Image (cartoon, rainbow, N blue to C red):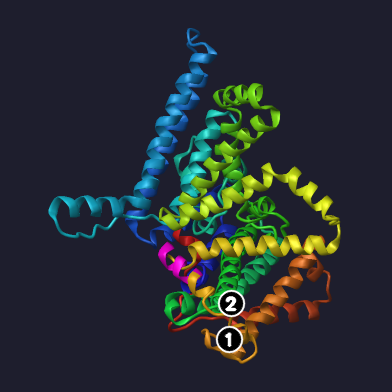
Amino acid sequence: MTFISLTFFAFLFITILLYFVTPLKFRWFILLASSIVFYAWSGFENLLFVLITALIAYFFAQRISRIYTNPNKRLDQKTRKLKAKSTLFVGLFLVIAALIYAKVGERVVSSLNSILSGEHIDIDVIVPLGISYYTFGIVGYMADVYWKRTKEERNLLKLLLYMIYFPQILQGPIPRHNKLSPQLAQGHPFNYEKLCFGLQRAVWGYFKKMVIADRFAIIVNQVFNNYEGYVGFQFIVAILASAIQLYTDFSGCIDIALGISECMSIELEENFKRPFFSKSAAEFWRRWHITLGAWFKDYIYMPIVVNPKLIQFCSKFRKKFGTRFAKNIMTVIPLAVVWILTGLWHGTGIDYILWGCYWGIIIITSTIFEPEYKKLASKMHIDISSWWWQIWKMIRTFLIFCGGRLLTAPGDIKVTGEIIKRIFSEFNIWIFFDESIYKLGLDRKDFWVGMAAIALLWFISIQQEKGVKIRERIASLPLVLRWIIYYGAVFSVIIFGIYGAGHHSSSFVYMQF
């Protein structure tokens, strides 16, 4: 059961109804029951897997807390800290080992059996729904208990709810215990405005997913799955379509999740902030998958930066090579670790590892050589504050993103290499003028419906970038006009959405991570 199915709509209606007719102090239990049903729909063995993870996190967080509060006066602060750290590491090892096993266990076990038996054997390994998202959430929870940023959860069921809260389990956003758990446990009264705003945001998410993402996915699948038959600008179109598809698919799912949650007055963290307005790669990742970037910053980047051994290591370079060199080392090491891990989070294949290196190199070099870039722009008499230069920087960042999509969208790094060769094998720019662009999977009508939807998305994004609150603006309109917009939004999804036989609207791109 995913967000795009009649079963889910019935499930959601019943959940919201039961939530608001149940006494406030028991409403968290309705959320838990609904989340268990939603999660078990993908298989009861998945629920067992996540329950074991919850038990591990619950036990080790409780243990860390008891170490800190142990009345034994013979345990000084340093000793307590060391015992708590060793306990944290054991807990993290068990939780992360489960994630690694789910990610690569099937291939490793199959390879070992093939070597031992001399023949290929397929082994099925359970990959629980949303494992990357709830694992990062629970790792952050245990680390925050260790750092005393949040209190340990004494109710195992509430910890389980924090892990598998159904709106966010498919694709995030990645939760923080001290922000989400109190909201889930609190119980919220009915709020008509939040219900309306939540439904509006969910409909906008369905529009992005079904009208734009699933439409342009047809081009992406057609070209990349049959790459031997295409050359030149046909791949350029497919890469651009892939970039649009990924953004509207992922952000559309997040809009649905945040909208559903808002209906019950529960606020999830924003995960996107119009990333295609970014003027640099670093800014792009502050706007794209925001909770993942924030997670890596808080739990990987900062612990490395403040590590005494790294500081001591860099101080030696400072004496020999100067402050800037040492500062660059301090920049390179944590960023390199973060981006290698980011690549591995997305996938364990060589394509995702190279993708992580690709983004890491771009961000590291742009950070290190920023003074040289400014000097070069000054020598070339470029006004870096001019509007045309800002537009160019946005286009450049979008093209960098497209380059990253070329590494991963084909699904195989060898295919990516072949596609790059075929891009430069023929300069067939005429496909934009001889109507052959309509032979890439979408006919004329569907292609221009997609382009019109992108234009609408772009217009609304510009308004939001200017600070316009679209939903509040709609709410201020006269009743008739307001409902015309509501009906228009819903029926645009029903009429122009891509679904039915041969299409898989129920799946989301980031569900695989």
Q: Residue at x 60, y 72 (%)?
A: 240
Q: Residue at x 79, y 48 (%)?
A: 374
Q: Amino acid at mark 1?
A: Ile
| Residue 42 in the image: above or below residue 363 | below
Contact between marks 1 and 2 (CB within 8 A): the answer is yes
* Residue on which the image places disc 2: 237
| Residue 307 in the image: above or below residue 359 | above
Along the line of sight, which residue is nearer the eye, 399 or 461?
A: 399
Q: Residues within 10 Å of mark 1 (few under 14, many from 20)?
A: some
Q: Is residue 361 visible?
A: yes
Q: Secondary structure at mark 2?
A: helix
Look at the image and say whether residue 415 sits in the magenta stretch: yes
Q: Is residue 482 left or right of residue 303?
A: right
Along the line of sight, which residue is nearer the eye, 7 or 397?
A: 397
As drawn, the label of residue 506 is: none
The picture places residue 116, in percent across and down from the top left corner, at 15, 50
As drawn, the label of residue 437 is: 1
Magenta stretch? 412-420
